[in-house]
Image: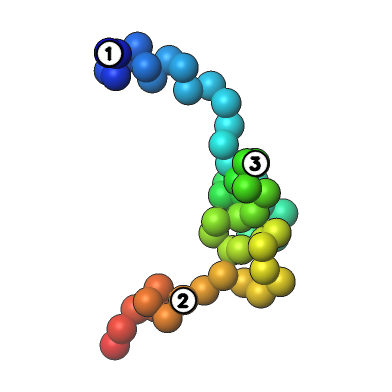
């Protein structure tokens, strides 16, 4: 069972590309939506209250 350095060489495909809406490299090619802003899944920007800094 190989799970060390040789396995790292098999990582050649891109799982995420640049998002058209937010510009982040977070648009999933498999699921076809951006995990950063929600583009492709929602018309609204993805944001949560827990992301904000508390005073």
Q: Earlier in the sequence, mark 3 or mark 2?
A: 3
Relative placement, left or right, of 12 versus 5 is: right
Q: Which residue is mark 2?
A: 48
**Is 8 located above or below residue 28 in the figure?**
above
Q: In the picture shown, does residue 31 fall above or below 2?
A: below
Q: Which residue is mark 1?
A: 1
Q: Residue furthest front?
A: 1
- Whether the residues at callouts 3 and 2 have beta carbons within 8 Å, the answer is no
Question: Mark number for residue 10?
Answer: none
Query: Which image quadrant is residue 45 in?
Result: bottom right
Can the viewer see residue 54 in this picture? yes
- Residue at which label 3 appears: 29
Image coordinates of residue 4 in percent, x first then y, are: 27, 18
Quadrant housing the C terminus = bottom left
Q: Is residue 23 visible?
A: no
Number of callouts? 3
């Amino acid at each position: 069972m190989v799970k060390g350095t040789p396995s790292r060489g098999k990582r050649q495909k891109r799982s995420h590309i640049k998002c058209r809406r937010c510009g982040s490299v977070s648009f999933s090619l498999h699921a076809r939506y951006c995990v950063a802003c929600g583009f492709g899944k929602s018309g609204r920007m993805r944001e949560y209250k827990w992301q904000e800094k508390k005073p």
